[in-house]
Amino acid sequence: MGIMDFLKKQFVDVIDWIQEDEGVLVYQYPFQDREIQNGGQLTVRESQAALFVNEGKVADLFGPGRHTLSTQTLPLMTNLKHWDKAFASPFKSDIYFFSMKNQIGQKWGTQGKLTLRDKDFGKIQIGAFGTYSYEIADPRLFFSKVSGTRPLFRVDDLQDQLRSVIEVAIASRLGQGDIPALDLAGQQARVSEEIRPFMAQHFTPLGLKLTGFLLQKVTLPEGVEKALEKNAAANSIDNMQKYTQFQMAENIGTAAASGGGTAGAGMGMAMGVAMGQQMAQMMGQAMNQQPAPAPQQQAPAKEDPVAVLEKLKTLLEKGLITQAEYDTKKAEVLSKL
């Protein structure tokens, strides 16, 4: 054997992966005709896993820590190789390192419109956008179903596949029609929590775990958007009677404004101003929940003292009051002057 052949055959006794690129999910350790020495050291760092593969068959999996490679630590590999010398000679195998980190802040969005059947608006088309996060939960399954024997598999290589999975899952979940379209637009956080468990079921068969899912925005048809705006306006009024008055004011103002000519425009403007003032007062009272203050009663006007004395004199002359009573009342009137 020549010196070059010997150098190519030098044995590998230390195997590890220092991840410098956060965008890598799977990394195949580069052997290049080298062989693993019996008793070699395998170092797997935190947030990593190392998978041994023999001729495309998944064998042994190692978690974080330092491992000495032997027949005791490689039982499945030993069985696949059928070593009859207690693993005394060097061996070859493919080793794949997996990043087990949580891949956060991944964006998703529907490629086209999703057709849903809503109980309020019937069949409608919507668009949806948001973020999600995931991590590799089962390296064996992920290798078999997704990454395969590629020497390098990145986060970007998985984006399109996961977006398709999310779109199918959302269409299936929202297609059940039990989440109103108005809730999709106004209660994204609650809807996200309802969809997340259903979404997770589509990640598990790929060897992944869905760690986060958020529905950030939903685009609704124009007609539904207008209904949403009117619904918000109606919610600011306490009862249906006030809501009816609000609708009547809106319709009367529109009809008056479209009556034609200066008279129609003037009438529309006057009615709009009057109804606007009335609605402002009505909504203000509804929001404050305070009754209008009662009108203050005016104090009775003071009677002329001369007139009072004349009335007392008349009563005395007619015998309706006594002289003593007359003198007492006269003194009271004069004391107030």
Image (cartoon, rainbow, N blue to C red):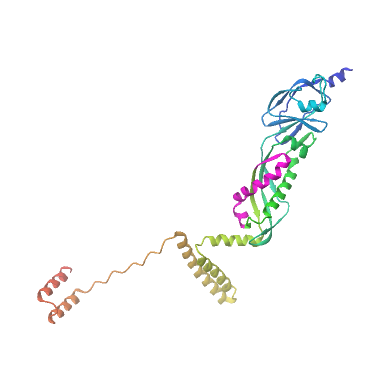
Give the mark count.
0
Q: Over which residues does the magenta segment extend?
A: 182-211
Q: Is residue 297 above or below residue 31?
A: below
Where is residue 92, by image quadrant?
Answer: top right
Q: Is residue 78 above or below residue 119?
A: above
Question: Main structural element of the magenta stretch: helix, strand or loop?
Answer: helix
Where is residue 52, by image quadrant?
Answer: top right
Percent across and percent down for residue 332 are 15, 69
Q: Is residue 201 left or right of 150 when viewed as pictured?
A: left
Question: 174 or 134, which is in the foreground?
Answer: 174
| Extreme residue toward the left, this view | 323
Percent across and percent down for residue 34 are 82, 23
Where is residue 42, by image quadrant?
Answer: top right
| Extreme residue toward the right, this view | 1
Percent across and percent down for residue 226 are 62, 62
Q: Is residue 186 above or below residue 105?
A: below
Q: Examine the structure image and report whether residue 157 is included in the region drawn in magenta.
A: no
Q: Examine the structure image and report whether residue 202 is included in the region drawn in magenta.
A: yes
Percent across and percent down for residue 208 are 70, 39
Q: Where the N terminus falls, by quadrant?
A: top right
Q: Is residue 151 above or below residue 179?
A: above
| Extreme residue toward the bottom, this view | 318
Q: Is residue 319 left or right of 230 when viewed as pictured?
A: left
Q: Where the C terminus falls, by quadrant?
A: bottom left
